[in-house]
Image (cartoon, rainbow, N blue to C red):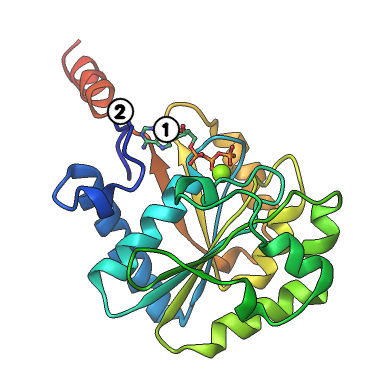
Amino acid sequence: MLEYIKDFDNHLAPFWKPGSIPAEQYRILRTRILETARNKGSKVFLISSAVLGEGKTLTAINLAISIVQGTHETALLIDADLRKPNIADMLGFEKDQKGLAEYLTSGGDPADFITKTSIPGLSIITSGLPPENPSELLDSEYMSDLIQEVKYRYDNRYIIIDSPPLIPITDSTILSSLADGVIMVVRASTTQRKMVNEAIDKIENKEKILGLVLNAYNRSVAYKYTYTYNYH
Ligand SMILES: Nc1ncnc2c1ncn2[C@@H]1O[C@H](COP(=O)(O)OP(=O)(O)OP(=O)(O)O)[C@@H](O)[C@H]1O
Ligand SMILES: [Mg+2]
C-alpha cells in the first residue's frame, strides 16, 4: 500500500529523501516483492494497471531505486509504454534519445540501448520516439530476444518494465507473457473493483501476478471512514 503523497513534487522519494514516509513505503513494497519473486524465481517484473494514471510509472521508478539502494542487486528499468512514455523525462534524460522503439524497429545489440543513470546500479532503456505500431513492435521476436538477453546477462539484476494500462490496449497483455511476474497498480478510491478484475482477465497466466499495489491511499479519509463505521 502506498499512501497519497500530498504536494507530490518529489517523484524519486527513495533517492532524494531516504528517511521520508514514501521512501519507507517503497522499501516495504520492494521487500515484499523481492521475497515473493525469490520464492518464484522471478526476475522480470511488469508494472501495469487497469486504466490510465494509476501510478505505474512512479511505482516502477521508485521500486527500481529501492531495489538498487537497499540490496546488492542492480536494476534495469525499461519504458515499454511506447504510447505515453515518461521515464526519460522523470529521470532527466532527453525524450528523443534512442530507446526501445528504435531497437524494436531496427534491431541491434540490446546493450547499445541501455543507459546508466546517476543512481548507482540503476540503468534504463528509454522508450524512444513513439512509433506508429506499438503493439506489433512489442509482439515481435526482437522484444522477446531483448528480455531473454537482459534477463540472463547478469545474475544480480532485476528487470522492471513500465507499461500502458491493460484495459484499453493489448500492449501489456503481450508484455505480461514475456515477464516473470506482474505487479498491478490500483489507484485507491478511484479504480473500481470490476475494472481491476477486467484488467486481471487480460493477463493470460494469472499465476504471474505477484501482487496489487494500492496506490495513493488517503489515510485520513480511511480513518474517518473507520470512525464513522464503528461509532455511528
Ligand atoms: N501515491 C501518490 N501520491 C500522490 N500522487 C501520485 C501518487 N502516485 C501517482 N501520483 C501522481 O499521479 C499521476 C499519475 O502517475 P503516473 O504517471 O505514475 O501514473 P501512470 O499509471 O504511469 O499513468 P499513465 O497511465 O498515464 O502512464 C502523476 O501526476 C503522479 O505524480
Ligand atoms: Mg506511465
Q: How far apart are the alpha carbons under marks 1 and 2?
A: 8 Å
- Quadrant position of the N terminus in the picture: top left
- Left or right: 42 in relation to 167: left
- Residue at coordinates 76% horizontally, 45% vertically from top-left? 169
Query: Which residue position holds label 1?
Result: 188
**Could you tell me the amino acid type at mark 2?**
Asn
Q: Is residue 206 visible?
A: yes
Q: Residues within 10 Å of mark 1 (few under 14, many from 20)?
A: some
Q: Residues within 10 Å of mark 2 (few under 14, many from 20)?
A: some
**Could you tell me the amino acid type at mark 1?**
Ala
- Left or right: 228 in relation to 76: left
- Residue at coordinates 54% horizontally, 89% vertically from top-left? 153
- Residue at coordinates 27% horizontally, 21% vertically from top-left? 221
**Residue 125 horizontal/vertical position (percent):** 58, 65
- Residue at coordinates 74% horizontally, 54% vertically from top-left? 171
**Residue 161 horizontal/vertical position (percent):** 56, 62
Is residue 50 depicted above or below 131 in this figure?
above
Q: Is residue 212 visible?
A: no
**Residue 145 horizontal/vertical position (percent):** 72, 81
In the picture, residue 217 is in which quadrant?
top left
In the picture, residue 146 is in which quadrant?
bottom right
Is residue 7 depicted above or below 118 in this figure?
above
Disc on res. 218 = 2
- Quadrant position of the C terminus in the picture: top left
SS at mark 1 in the image: loop
- Residue closer to the observer: 5 or 9: 9
